Image (cartoon, rainbow, N blue to C red):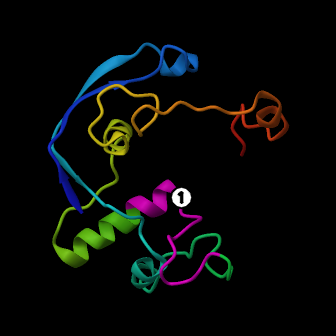
């Protein structure tokens, strides 16, 4: 876990989807965030309490101890945070949308991409073929 001082985030995108507009200023209070995803090894003791295993738990492609746990629902993640807090005596919770975006920008206030000077330079035909212009379920 690392401490983030908090600050200002310009959240949203004028060129994005309508539900991302308008760009608005969000004040972020100081908070703590993990520097790495929860691993299968870290998640396993939680499952020993009887919580249902995530979707890909038995899949050898995704269940090495040092791999991030996958197939976890939001509800599973909240339950894990509650369990971890009870086990350690330290409060844990999921970051809010604005906290997650703020942390991923690494201190940049207004950026389309979390690395300086970068722009997505996709290939218009290849992106369409890969359907990269829309989300997938």
Q: Position of residue 125 (x, y in %)?
A: 83, 30
Q: Is residue 37 left or right of residue 134?
A: left
Picture residue at 58% right of the left edge, 71% below the top:
54
**Above or below — where is 88 with respect to 70?**
below
Q: Position of residue 65 (x, y in %)?
A: 50, 84
Overall secondary structure of the magenta stretch? loop
Q: Position of residue 132 (x, y in %)?
A: 73, 37
**Above or below — where is 28 with respect to 71?**
above
Q: Is residue 75 magenta?
A: yes
**Above or below — where is 94 with respect to 36?**
above
Q: Is residue 136 magenta?
A: no
Picture residue at 29% right of the left edge, 28% below the top:
109
> Element type at marker 1?
loop
The image quarter containing residue 117 is top left
Which residue corresponds to mark 1?
73
Residue located farthest toward the front when viewing the structure as drawn: 117
Q: Position of residue 95 (x, y in %)?
A: 33, 48
Q: Which residues are magenta?
A: 62-78
Q: Is residue 41 left or right of residue 6?
A: right
């Amino acid at each position: 876990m690392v401490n983030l001082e908090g600050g200002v985030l310009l959240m949203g995108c004028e060129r994005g989807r309508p539900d991302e507009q308008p760009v608005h200023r969000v004040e972020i209070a100081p908070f703590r965030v993990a520097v790495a995803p929860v691993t299968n090894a870290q998640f396993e003791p939680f499952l020993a309490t009887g919580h249902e295993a995530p979707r890909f738990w038995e899949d050898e492609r995704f269940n090495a101890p040092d791999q991030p746990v996958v197939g976890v629902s939001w509800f599973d993640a909240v339950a894990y945070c509650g369990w971890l807090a009870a086990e350690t005596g330290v409060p844990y919770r999921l970051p809010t949308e604005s906290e997650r975006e703020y942390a991923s920008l690494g201190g940049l206030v207004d950026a389309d991409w979390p690395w300086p000077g970068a722009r997505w330079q996709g290939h218009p035909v290849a992106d369409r073929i890969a359907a990269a212009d829309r989300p997938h379920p």
